[in-house]
Amino acid sequence: MARKLNMQAHADDSRMVDAVRNSVEQIWQAGLGAFAKAQQEGEEMFSKLVQEGMAVQKRTQNLAGEQLADLSETVAGMAESLGRRASGSLEKLESVFEDRMAQAMRSLGVPTHNDIEALGQRIGELHEMINKLIAQKHGDRPAARKAVKPAKQAAKSAVKKTAPKKKTRAAARKSPASTATRA
């Protein structure tokens, strides 16, 4: 009986080995089948993933482009606003500078452009008056003014025409008029 039991155990062991061997082969074949299926479906899946990735990339780029355009408009608006503020500030600064320069020039006694223009006009009027007086003295009609001379030249010519001749120092000492003016 021990032999029968021993044979039966041996037969059971061999069935078990066969069963395990069959299971291992089936697992191996299932693995190969899964690998083949995954490889076949993997290529299709890979193509689908690539297409979906391209679609996502396009959407992302379009969205980024829209946001970039919005951001560009915002930045341009801010730059324009800052430019207007800066130019306004610059104009204020120029105005303050010009006012202070004019004030400093007045305090130093430097004539303004308007003062010089008024002086030139007054010199022209005086020149005409002198010409009329000279003409009346000589009995002539007043000479028509040919062209407006610059203020300096008009003043020089008026002084030359009306200024008395200078006396020498010796004659000035002897002259009674010069002693009267000194006193």
Image (tube, helix red, strand yellow):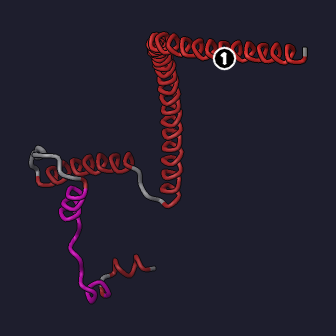
Q: Is residue 160 above or below residue 84?
A: below
Residue 124's x, y, as percent? 24, 48
In percent of width and height, residue 17 lies at 72, 18
- The residue sitting at 35% across, 46% down in the picture is 118
Check the image and report above or below for 1 versus 105.
above
Q: Which residues are magenta?
A: 152-173
* 175 to the left or right of 105: left
> SS class of the residue under badge 1?
helix
Instruction: Measuring from the top left, give residue 126's x and y in whole percent.
Output: 27, 50
Residue 49 image position (x, y, % from top left): 49, 14
Q: Residues within 10 Å of mark 1 (few under 14, many from 20)?
A: few
Q: Taking 36 as reference, is 71 above or below it?
A: below
Q: Nearer the viewer, residue 55 or 67?
A: 55
The reply to whether the magenta stretch includes residue 157 is: yes
Tell me the kind of residue under disc 1: Arg
Residue linked to disc 1: 21
Nearest to the observer: residue 67 or residue 48: 48
Whether residue 59 is visible:
no
Q: Quadrant of the N terminus?
A: top right
Q: Quadrant of residue 26?
A: top right
* Camera sees residue 30: yes
Up the image or down, 49 lies above or below 169; here it is: above
Q: Residue at x 20, y 51 (%)?
A: 133
